[in-house]
Amino acid sequence: MKSFDNQYFADYRMYVAINVLLDTFGRIGEVLNIKISDIDFYNRTIFFPITKNNNFRYVLYSKQTKQLIINFTDEFREMNSEYLFVDVNGNRWQEEAFRNSLMKYGMNRLHLIGQLP
């Protein structure tokens, strides 16, 4: 995770999204559907209204993830979106785009550290 360059929007967004995924055990669709209003910073919970089994749920997240989310939302406030994770146009980040980015990051990182020919 240290190989992300958080000076770039795409890298920073991916870094925060992966941290939220790992910390909440959320599914990709659940995490990409997070709205700013779904986040309770005081109690460190995130509301997932849309889940695989159609039952809403609340999940806890760590202090580290809380700080990442706060920094991320402060940095990209001008996107003016209700969603936490958006594309460069301010629209909700789509699952297919996330998966493609994840593969790109994974393949590039593996190649850089000599795991791929």
Image (cartoon, rainbow, N blue to C red):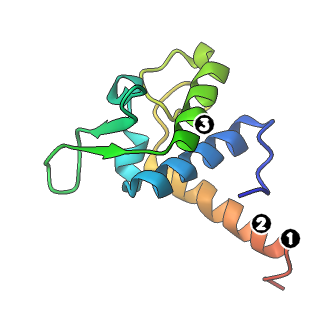
Tag 3 or tag 1, which sits nearer the N-term?
3
Crowd rating for badge 2 (residues with CA inside 10 Å; few <14, some 14–19, many 20+) = few
Distance, label 2 to label 3, CA atoms, is 24 Å
| Residue 9 as seen in the image, left or right of residue 40 | right
Residue ID for mark 1: 112
Q: Quadrant of the N terminus?
A: bottom right
Tag 3 or tag 2, which sits nearer the N-term?
3
**Residue 23 location, x and y as percent?**
47, 53
Q: Secondary structure at mark 2?
A: helix
Distance, label 2 to label 1, CA atoms, is 6 Å
Number of disc labels: 3
Q: Residue at x 48, y 31 (%)?
A: 84
**Residue 14 location, x and y as percent?**
62, 47
Q: Secondary structure at mark 1?
A: helix
Residue ID for mark 2: 108
Crowd rating for badge 3 (residues with CA inside 10 Å; few <14, some 14–19, many 20+) = some
Kindly check if marks 2 and 1 are in contact, taking CB atoms under 8 A apart as contact: yes
Eyeballing the image, is 28 above or below 62? below
Q: Residue at x 77, y 37 (%)?
A: 8
Distance, label 1 to label 3, CA atoms, is 26 Å
Kindly check if marks 2 and 3 are in contact, taking CB atoms under 8 A apart as contact: no
| Residue 35 as seen in the image, left or right of residue 88 | left
Foreground residue, 44 or 13?
44
Residue ID for mark 3: 68
**Residue 74 location, x and y as percent?**
62, 20
